Amino acid sequence: MNPKDTKPPSGGDWAKNLDDKERLFVEGYLQTLNKRKAARYAGYTDDSAARHAYEIFNRPNVREAIESCLRNRTGITKPWIVDKLAPIIDTNLSDIGSWDADGTFVLLPSDDLTDEQKVAVSEVVTEYGKNGRTTKVKLHDKLAAMAQLSKLLNMLVDRQEISGPGGGPVEVTDHRARLTERLNDIAKRMAPDNDGASGAV
């Protein structure tokens, strides 16, 4: 993500619930994507920035302002993050190739992979040596993706509200339902005997 693409949008109501220091903190965070630098931008000294950065960042009104700006400027939302992480967890080596009894792995052509399967592939490296050609295939770390989804779920639980504006449904409830649905689908698809993250020919 390019910090230049995350400056606060001109106009709008993103800062209406912020005091001056909180507004500066949001502006600093969107430009640096760093909590401590954002605190310094808001006027805190180096020592006090280290003490206050995390607390300010986790204030509900500050988080709401940051998320609103990111959503408006980049299209990044919680469901979008879920949709990007889920394929990493969901995709196994058997989805992108096959291997015989000798362990020879054959990678499917990229045109035969779905967009989600392509997202899960971290790298494909072909090396040539005295024993011929070797192709190494690596998938993105499933455990890391699961950890990110867990953090996202915890964040949503922490910020759960009783009702939304005007007594309507809270948007976060829809996010949790979407996340639960994706994780249930993943659990059904996961092969118990294939949890690898890389393969080689």
Image (cartoon, rainbow, N blue to C red):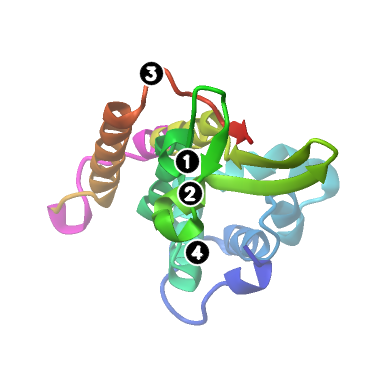
* Residue 148 place in picture, x, y as percent: 51, 37
Tell which tag, 1 or 3, sits nearer the viewer.
1
Label 2, residues with CA under 10 Å away: few <14, some 14-19, many ≥20: few
Q: What numbered label is drawn on residue 192?
A: 3
Q: Earlier in the sequence, mark 4 or mark 2?
A: 4
Residue at horizontal 56%, vertical 25%? 103
**Which amino acid, by three-letter code, is at mark 2?**
Leu
| Contact check, label 1 and label 3, Cβ < 8 Å | no
Horizontally, residue 90 falls left or right of residue 39, namely: left
**Which amino acid, by three-letter code, is at mark 3?**
Pro
* Residue 5 place in picture, x, y as percent: 60, 73
Q: Is residue 160 magenta?
A: yes
Horizontally, residue 31 falls left or right of residue 196, namely: right
Which residues fall within the magenta stretch? Answer: 154-167
* Residue 53 place in picture, x, y as percent: 67, 44
Q: Earlier in the sequence, mark 2 or mark 1?
A: 1
- Using the numbered discs, state the Cα–Cα distance from disc 4 to disc 3 in whole angstroms: 38 Å
Q: Earlier in the sequence, mark 1 or mark 3?
A: 1
Residue at the extreme top: 193
Q: What numbered label is drawn on residue 70?
A: 4
Q: Quadrant of residue 155?
A: top left
Residue at horizontal 49%, vertical 57%? 110
Say what secondary structure mark 3 lies in.
loop
Which residue lies under the disc numbered 1?
97
